[in-house]
Amino acid sequence: MRPGEIRRLQWRDVDFLDQSLLVREAKTAAGVRVLPLNGDAFAAIMQLRERSKAIGGTEPEHYLFPSQEGYST
């Protein structure tokens, strides 16, 4: 993933059942894609989710990395 794609990830882009990410905003239209997560990546996402719960940041429109979008913890 490109750094900009990572920064724009929102919780709505995480498919917990299929353990995948949806890249909605990409550099080109061809860049919109679904990425499967391996076990380590999925575990990291789940850790982020737990941290986000502590600050009330788990709504679908919230970012996985809120400090990247002007919100610092």
Image (cartoon, rainbow, N blue to C red):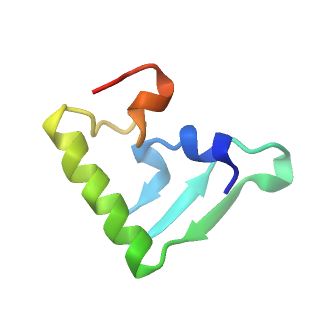
Along the line of sight, the residue nearer the viewer: 45 or 19: 45
Q: Quadrant of the C terminus?
A: top left
* Residue 13 located left or right of residue 30: left
* Residue 41 located left or right of residue 27: left
Whether residue 61 is visible, yes or no, is: no
Q: Residue at x 69, y 60 (%)?
A: 33
Q: Quadrant of residue 14?
A: bottom left
Q: Residue at x 49, y 67 (%)?
A: 20
* Residue 3 located left or right of residue 69: right
Q: Residue at x 79, y 54 (%)?
A: 31
Residue 23 lies, with reference to residue 21, above or below; the image says above
Outermost residue on the bottom side: it is: 39
Q: Quadrant of the N terminus?
A: bottom right
Whether residue 40 is visible, yes or no, is: yes
Q: Quadrant of residue 15?
A: bottom left
Q: Residue 27, image x and y in percent?
A: 81, 43
Q: Residue at x 37, y 39 (%)?
A: 60
